[in-house]
Amino acid sequence: MKNLPYKALKGTKDILPPESFVWQNLEEKARRLFSHYGYQEIRTPIIEELKLFVRSVGETTDIVQKEMFSFKDRGGREICLRPEATASCVRAYLESNLSSEPIVKFYYFGPMFRAERPQKGRYRQFHQIGVEVLGANSYLVDAEVILLLVELVKEFSLEHFLLKINSLGCTEDKKKISEEYRKILLKRKERLCPLCQERCERNVLRVLDCKEKRCQEIIGDLPSTLEMLCENCRRHFQSLLDILSSLNIKYTVEPRIVRGLDYYTRTVFELTSELLGSQDALAAGGRYDNLIEDLGGPSLGAVGFALGMERVIIALEKSGKLNEFVEKPLEVFLITLGEEADKEGFLLMERLRKKDISVDMDYSGKSLKAKMRRADKLKIRFVIIIGEDELKKGRYILRDMQSGYQEMINKEDLEKLCKKIRGEQG
Ligand code: AMP
């Protein structure tokens, strides 16, 4: 239908069945895994004050500069649709005084909003599953978060992913790295794209995110961030790599990933999949040791990741595994013929559902043949038929659509009917 007056906004989409069942299934798997590791769900508002993200994600980042859906409300307050959830989690953690707890482990699901140019795998409303561990400095927590991400992706039946990992060091190291990079890049400034020329002045680490070929060539020559780490940060990173190896987690150290958000310190990581094409990042995360303090709390470390759900779905489609997550069909489809039979069938359905049997009927009044076709299309194993004759004789026809075998069952014998449907003897 081309000429409908209303359509979903560009870069947004409806998630319809059967895909919605895949989402539910994946979310259920994630919930089970997270609670196994001691994580609890947090649900924060979708709208927040604009300044929360300006302060946390960073004024010079792409997200803040050009991707936020922000507006003034009727009271003149500057509001925005959240572009990510880390800042909201930290705000909520501080607002609820949770920073007095030794450690807080959150997980979340939900939509995020970025006004990016839509393309396959890149939307304006997209969904993330993420975790945040707040109030923790140990490298073991970085390891736990990375382990959890890898386990999650495995739960989702995704293989062929690549974990890239790096360290940006503490605030002082980050400053040192930025200065060193600025010095080198300014010497080659005219070879950089106009945006990166500007980035050299305002936020030089952003140059490393540039996808332009000419910038990539220059970035490739920059020294590794790891060469500029202080002793403490170096030890933190090495301990993390060692424990990841002990966990048999495969990674590559990628000394030039910095991530597109300003709050990261020390560990940063990305999980990419070759199934995804140009938007190949499945998930990303890292440590943010200054954010809690920057947002008005005590000086406590934190680490987290966010995984893009749409990209998981694309990867499952590409690997032919989407069907593993699709809903199981109903057990029974009820076919009734005539008004009286409709009523009888309707009441029978409710009795079957109370016996934990999933069942539905077609209310359309179509022919037996049409209804049988529908049961077939829905891949439903059993059909119960109630026509005028069955009504009169007080019985139902139960047909096994797989074998084509059918038998009469007395309407009083609900137990027998249920047993047959469940495949039990008797
Ligand atoms: P980020 O918050 O930018 O670190 O992104 C974390 C993950 O969210 C990425 O690895 C993607 O899987 C997903 N993601 C980010 N932006 C988008 C987008 N515009 N559309 C779809 N997924 C996205």
Image: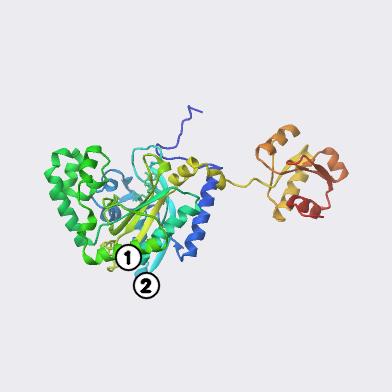
Residue sitting nearer the eye, 127 or 160: 160
> What is the x, y in percent for residue 184?
14, 48
SS at badge 1: helix
Residue sitting nearer the eye, 199 or 293: 199
Task: Bin the neighbour count of mark 1 within 10 Å (Cα to Cα): few under 14, some 14-19, many 20 and up.
Answer: some
Q: Which residue is mark 2?
A: 102
Residue sitting nearer the eye, 253 or 195: 253
State how far apart marks 1 and 2 are (Cα).
Answer: 22 Å
Horizontal arrangement in the rendering, residue 19 relative to residue 216 (left or right): right
Q: Quadrant of residue 114?
A: top left
Quarter of the C terminus within the rendering: bottom right
Q: Which residue is mark 1?
A: 239
Q: Residue furthest top?
A: 3
Horizontal arrangement in the rendering, residue 361 relative to residue 314 (left or right): right
Q: Amino acid at mark 1?
A: Ser
Residue depth check, mark 1 versus mark 2: number of the one nearer the observer: 1
Residue depicted at x 14% and y 38%: 190
Residue depicted at x 23% and y 48%: 206
Q: Amino acid at mark 2?
A: Pro
Horizontal arrangement in the rendering, residue 24 relative to residue 139 (left or right): right
Residue depicted at x 36% and y 62%: 142
- The answer to whether residue 203 is visible is no
SS at badge 2: loop
Q: Is mark 2 within 8 Å of ligand 1?
A: no
Q: Quadrant of residue 135?
A: bottom left
